[in-house]
Amino acid sequence: MKTSPAGDPMPKLSCRNVWKLYGPAADKSLIAQGMTPEQIRDAGHIVASADVSFDVMEGEIFVIMGLSGSGKSTIVRCLSRLVEATSGEILLDGEDLLKASSKELIDIRRHKMGMVFQSFGLMPHLNVLENVAFPLKLQGMGAKERLEHAQRVVNLVGLEGREHSYPNQLSGGQQQRVGIARSLAVEPEVWFLDEPFSALDPLIRRQMQDEFLRLQSELNKSIVFITHDFLEALRIADRMAIMKDGEVVQIGRPVDLILNPANDYVREFTNDVPWELVLTAGDISSDRPIPDGIKTVDASAGVASLLPYLAENDGIGVENKESGERSYLTGRDVIAALATGVQTSDTEEA
């Protein structure tokens, strides 16, 4: 991991003040004039991304989510330069990808980037092993070596025994595994996934999320993952950004967005979340001394598992084993957390 002169970890990937505009005269001059997104739209242009900034750390799963048309897919395509940003910087290990030549960009895509999209994009005339090995062929790797390497990746995603099957002989989940394997074959440093599971039925989707998390535990990639599903984001995200109308509304850990939504738009995403199954003791405990004789649990303990105890006791001690910090959690703390941002017609009238 690279570090700054001060010794702090440096981001693997940085998106800095990135704009993407569409229109007959949509160029940097509009941004240089200091026009707001609203003013640019009023001038007849489309603002797909507006001054978007975030960092992705080494080994982090960074989720970007929003409703259709929020700009989340546009920004991931700007990161990979499948779409050319109008303005801004995209830094990979400190190097601005927007300044890379076509030749340099081809090399970066072949060796440092992996991309998976909702559409599997498999080549129907190639079997599983050949599909996975195809990007290695583009790298110039010899036939024997690339097939051996592809076989290892096929095994990694759980497709042993299906190496010689063709895409039309596979289920949707199996096809997506091939797409994932193909993107991993080049051993990318950064991995872009744009709603990769949204076309799958719910059961297969959850299985693929489990598989994705298993792969990440082994590979520790720096990942940008696009979704419109908050529950999916909760399962996989280390941090997440929520976008609306091309702009980033809020960035933080999933639990931060649940407990402290920046506005009603963010709050809407959390309305159907089973919070008691998401929150941990450490998320909502208070910095108070633990009374003598009180049971203590780890900060990672799920709140749902503590409800029976809190129903019969005033509170419970919480200890973070990594930092050594100790805090106290009461039933009132749980109620306050669950009530965050909740409004009913009765309370509004009151």
Image (cartoon, helix red, strand yellow):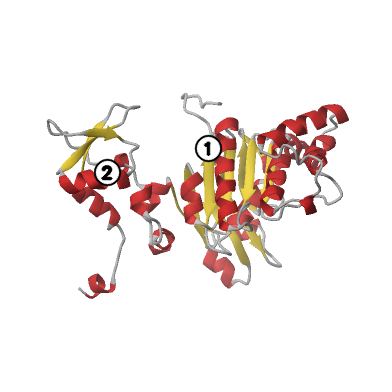
Q: Quadrant of residue 110?
A: top right
**Identity of the residue drawn at 63% across and 38% down:** 190
Circle 1 sits on which residue?
60
Horizontal and vertical percent position of residue 191: 64, 41
Query: Which of 209/67 is in front?
Result: 209
Outermost left residue: 292
Q: Quadrant of residue 132?
A: top right
Q: Is any part of residue 17 visible from this angle?
A: no
Dot 2 amino acid type = Leu
Nearer to us of marks 1 and 2 is 2
User: What element does badge 1 sit on?
Assistant: loop
**Identity of the residue drawn at 62% across and 66% down:** 46
In the rendered structure, the answer to whether residue 7 lies left or right of residue 103 reads left
Query: Which of 299/30 is in front?
Result: 299
Horizontal and vertical percent position of residue 50: 56, 57
Q: Quadrant of the N terminus?
A: top right
Query: Which of 45/276 is in front?
Result: 276
Q: Gap in Å between the C-alphas at discs 1 and 2?
A: 29 Å
Dot 1 amino acid type = Glu
Q: Earlier in the sequence, mark 1 or mark 2?
A: 1
In the rendered structure, the answer to whether residue 112 lies left or right of residue 270 reads right
User: What element does badge 2 sit on?
Assistant: helix
Q: How many marks?
A: 2
Horizontal and vertical percent position of residue 113: 69, 39
Outermost front residue: 161
Query: Which of 259/108 is in front?
Result: 259
Q: Quadrant of the C terminus?
A: bottom left
Circle 2 sits on which residue?
306
Horizontal and vertical percent position of residue 164: 82, 41
**Identity of the residue drawn at 55% across and 50% down:** 206
Q: Residues within 10 Å of mark 2 (few under 14, many from 20)?
A: some
